[in-house]
């Protein structure tokens, strides 16, 4: 995992210590001595996570965080406050300012890396959603406003009745709380209900709460619901493991009601914001940028979004790979079985692309029987493996026509190109992939060819 981390502290020794720890994990590290320098860096360069000291002269960390969150261009950057302060009132103030978490000095290495990696993963997802939403806005489509005033729906999974009552009472002013004691039943409830947040208390006598967190993240219907874990003081190991599994936040016992309230509201707001972004991709954008036959994004969307992905990859020095695939001898399907049969093959081919590509990849119908898969943060070797998997999935199972029951053997040729070979523009990237596809066609079809370095 690679990301750019900004360390902000007025004490050089603290900066050097954090910088060394992050560089050892292969992060790209920027440093700032004060709040003004932090704001200036964020205005000029892309930053993935900010480690922000609170006690600084001139402008303290609280004010810096408030300014970052008030600016639409930096509001999405996760902020971790690093401080010697360890009072609930300070954490509440920081959370109200928009901080995502706190690390107390001296910083524990395991907690530092677990929190940074967790926030980087969340930001990558949020960045992808924001890019796609921006593409929608560029072509004149936007999603509805988030539901700010509606009470939150929170699922509380807690093994003890008295603890359930205390937590539910603290959240009652802002949320409707459903409390459950059975973790397995809670998994089904999370999948079937409509929840803004799941709180998992680690107080079970005979059940591992991390297993519940893992299962919530593995199920599609609960994957994007934020999870807040309640742990005992001294539970740093459990917290680090939970963050690796994908939980969003945690709170230590004994629980401060104000801190609990603010942490929950932060997660609910973030979920509703991300839901809004997903709506802009999956619902309101559909008619304008979706191919009506296959359900994949169309050429119009690809042209807009690929340029954004290309520019981001170049700015951050990250790889971007593109695969163009073409159904072999597709004209003979139309000529022999008719255009309705050809449409069936195109729809099934698109379905197999969807089943093969990864969640962050972008699959589009390029035109006719050609399709494009855009793979952010992907080296050519990995892109070739994805393309080979798609080639195999297409060839391995016949395409059965519904009306006649005829089973057709269909194959595909695929060409790959990547930005790591010094590609100067989106147009050149597409041309390289197209030339590789041409080589695959003329080399015998049903194969994957990568553009030469």
Image (tube, rainbow, N blue to C red):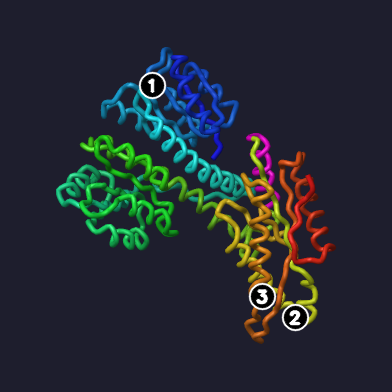
Residue 438 is a magenta residue: no
Find the distance from the CA under tag 1 to the CA under tag 3.
60 Å
Callout 3 crowding tier (Cα within 10 Å): few <14, some 14–19, many ≥20 = some
In primary-sequence order, the first of circles 3 and 2 is 2
Callout 2: helix, strand or loop? loop
Magenta region, main secondary structure:
helix
Mark 3–mark 2 Cα distance, whole angstroms, equals 10 Å
**Residue 72 visible at all:** no
Task: From the image, tell me which residue sits under label 3.
Answer: 344
Q: Are marks 1 and 3 in contact (CB under 8 Å)?
A: no
Sooner in the amino-acid sequence: mark 1 or mark 3: 1
Relative image position of residue 329 (x, y in whole percent): 79, 71
What span is colored magenta in the figure?
302-316
Q: Which residue is mark 1?
A: 54
Q: Secondary structure at mark 1?
A: loop
Q: Is residue 403 left or right of residue 331?
A: left
Look at the image and say whether residue 311 sits in the magenta stretch. Answer: yes
Asked if residue 105 shows in the view, the reply is yes
**Residue at x 31%, y 61% (from the top left corner):** 189
């Amino acid at each position: 995992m690679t990301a750019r981390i900004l360390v902000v502290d007025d004490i050089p020794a603290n900066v050097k210590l954090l910088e060394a720890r992050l560089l050892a994990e292969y992060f790209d590290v920027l440093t700032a001595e004060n709040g003004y320098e932090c704001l200036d860096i964020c205005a000029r360069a892309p930053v993935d996570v900010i480690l922000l000291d609170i006690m600084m002269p001139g402008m303290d960390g609280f004010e810096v965080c408030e300014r970052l969150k008030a600016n639409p261009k930096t509001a999405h950057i996760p902020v971790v406050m690093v401080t010697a302060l360890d009072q609930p009132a300070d954490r509440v103030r920081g959370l109200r300012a928009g901080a995502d978490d706190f690390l107390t000095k001296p910083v524990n290495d395991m907690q530092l890396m677990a929190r940074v990696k967790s926030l980087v993963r969340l930001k990558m997802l949020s960045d992808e959603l924001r890019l796609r939403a921006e593409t929608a806005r560029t072509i004149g489509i936007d999603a509805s406003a988030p539901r700010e005033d509606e009470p939150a729906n929170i699922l509380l999974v807690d093994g003890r009745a008295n603890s359930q009552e205390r937590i539910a009472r603290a959240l009652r002013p802002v949320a409707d709380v459903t409390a459950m004691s059975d973790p397995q039943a809670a998994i089904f409830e999370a999948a079937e209900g409509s929840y803004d947040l799941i709180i998992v208390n680690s107080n079970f006598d005979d059940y591992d709460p991390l297993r519940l967190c893992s299962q919530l993240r593995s199920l599609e219907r609960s994957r994007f619901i934020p999870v807040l874990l309640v742990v005992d003081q001294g539970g740093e190991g459990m917290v680090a493991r939970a963050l690796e599994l994908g939980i969003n936040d945690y709170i230590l016992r004994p629980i401060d009601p104000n801190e609990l309230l603010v942490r929950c509201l932060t997660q609910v707001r973030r979920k509703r914001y991300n839901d809004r972004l997903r709506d802009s991709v999956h619902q309101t954008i559909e008619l304008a940028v979706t191919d009506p036959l296959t359900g994949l994004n169309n050429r119009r969307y690809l042209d807009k979004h690929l340029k954004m992905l290309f520019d981001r990859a170049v700015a951050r020095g990250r790889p971007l790979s593109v695969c163009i695939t073409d159904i072999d001898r597709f004209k003979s399907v139309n000529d022999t079985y008719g255009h309705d049969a050809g449409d069936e093959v195109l729809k099934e081919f698109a379905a197999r692309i969807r089943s093969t590509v990864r969640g962050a990849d972008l699959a589009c119908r390029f035109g006719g029987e050609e399709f494009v898969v855009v793979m952010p943060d992907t080296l050519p070797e990995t892109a070739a493996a994805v393309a080979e998997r798609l080639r195999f999935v297409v060839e391995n199972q016949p395409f059965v026509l519904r009306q006649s029951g005829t089973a057709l053997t269909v194959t595909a040729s695929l060409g790959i190109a990547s930005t790591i070979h010094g590609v100067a523009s989106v147009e050149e990237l597409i041309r390289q992939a197209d030339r590789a596809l041409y080589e695959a066609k003329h080399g015998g079809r049903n194969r994957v060819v990568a553009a030469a370095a």
